[in-house]
Image (cartoon, helix red, strand yellow):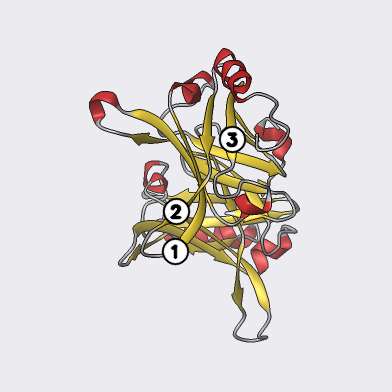
């Protein structure tokens, strides 16, 4: 997921290698890497930073490779090369870095990350455990033929916070904020409906999608509620949650440590 205006990507730390000697692994893919200079064979210096990493392009103005290696090691970093992945589906620019230098940045396997990039530089920060980053997609309104925004939230993590399939929830929107609230028994359906109408909320049911590629719990919201909060197609959202409540606001990179 990305935004041309904000130059944002999301990623996560995975495990590389066998369990006995596994290492944390970070991977970025996509044509956006080429656009910021991370072309096939490009030399990249990865350095730990507080709560994250900095990945710097080193192809230009290298006076001494051995000196670069020495300085990188002194700072707890690593050198890697971008490459073009070659699989059955596509050939995509890819950048992978693995090893203890990820741990030095305060990262661990399973962490969700946000990355902000510009030419020659990618900065990575770890998200709080109850925060996710998503973007608004679009759908074609069958009545008007116009494209309008939709928000698609999915994953088994929704079950852990009370948004299980078939759960009824209210959706409240105000300028700059959308709030999802889950309601479970023993609340009576009619009471929820009255509450929603009295507070001008929308009622939505959590669903479950089964497919060839994914089986997951899903929240799908589109159209008026998103627009009334001032959000549009391709907007990136800072999603913060606790049990039974999800709050959606437009992303401010400064809140993520940039």
User: Is 29 or 185 nearer to us in this picture?
Assistant: 29
Q: Is residue 57 above or below residue 205?
A: above
Residue 50 at x, y = what percent?
61, 21
**Separation of marks 1 and 3 at Cα, in angstroms:** 23 Å
Among the two numbered marks 1 and 3 on one chain, the one whose residue lies closer to the N terminus: 3
Residue 166 at x, y = what percent?
37, 60
Q: Secondary structure at mark 2?
A: strand
**Separation of marks 3 and 2 at Cα, in angstroms:** 16 Å
Residue at which label 3 appears? 44
Residue at which label 2 appears? 85
Q: Is residue 239 above or below residue 77?
A: below
Q: Residue at x 52, y 39 (%)?
A: 81
Q: Secondary structure at mark 3?
A: strand
The C terminus sits in image quarter: top right
Q: Are marks 1 and 3 in contact (CB under 8 Å)?
A: no
Question: Could you tell me if residue 125 is visible in this image?
Answer: no
Q: Badge 2 local density, few (<14 within 10 Å), some, or many (20+)?
A: some
Left or right, 64 with respect to 91, comes to: right
Q: Are marks 3 and 2 in contact (CB under 8 Å)?
A: no
Residue 229 location, quadrant:
bottom right
Residue at which label 1 appears? 90
Question: Could you tell me if residue 94 is visible in this image?
Answer: yes
The N terminus sits in image quarter: bottom right
Left or right, 228 with respect to 241, comes to: right
């Amino acid at each position: 997921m990305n935004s041309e205006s904000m130059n944002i990507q999301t990623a996560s730390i995975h495990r590389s290698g066998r369990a006995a000697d596994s290492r944390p692994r970070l991977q970025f893919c996509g044509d956006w890497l080429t656009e910021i200079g991370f072309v096939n064979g490009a030399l990249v210096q990865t350095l730990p930073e507080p709560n994250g990493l900095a990945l710097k392009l080193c192809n230009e103005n290298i006076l001494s490779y051995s000196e670069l290696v020495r300085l990188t090691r002194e700072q707890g970093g690593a050198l890697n090369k971008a490459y073009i992945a070659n699989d059955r589906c596509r050939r995509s620019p890819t950048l992978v870095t693995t090893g203890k230098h990820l741990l030095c940045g305060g990262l661990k396997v399973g962490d969700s990350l946000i990355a902000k990039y510009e030419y020659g530089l990618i900065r990575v920060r770890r998200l709080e455990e109850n925060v996710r980053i998503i973007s608004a997609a679009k759908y074609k309104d069958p009545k008007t033929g116009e494209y309008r925004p939709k928000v698609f939230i999915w994953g088994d993590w929704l079950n852990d916070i009370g948004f299980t399939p078939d759960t009824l929830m209210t959706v409240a929107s105000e300028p700059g904020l959308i709030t999802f609230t889950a309601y479970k028994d023993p609340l009576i359906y009619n009471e929820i409906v009255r509450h929603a109408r009295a507070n001008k909320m929308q009622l939505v049911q959590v669903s479950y999608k089964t497919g060839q590629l994914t089986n997951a719990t899903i929240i799908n919201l589109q159209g008026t509620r998103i627009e009334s909060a001032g959000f549009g197609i391709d907007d990136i959202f800072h999603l913060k949650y606790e049990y039974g409540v999800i709050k959606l606001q437009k992303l401010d990179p400064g809140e993520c440590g940039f």
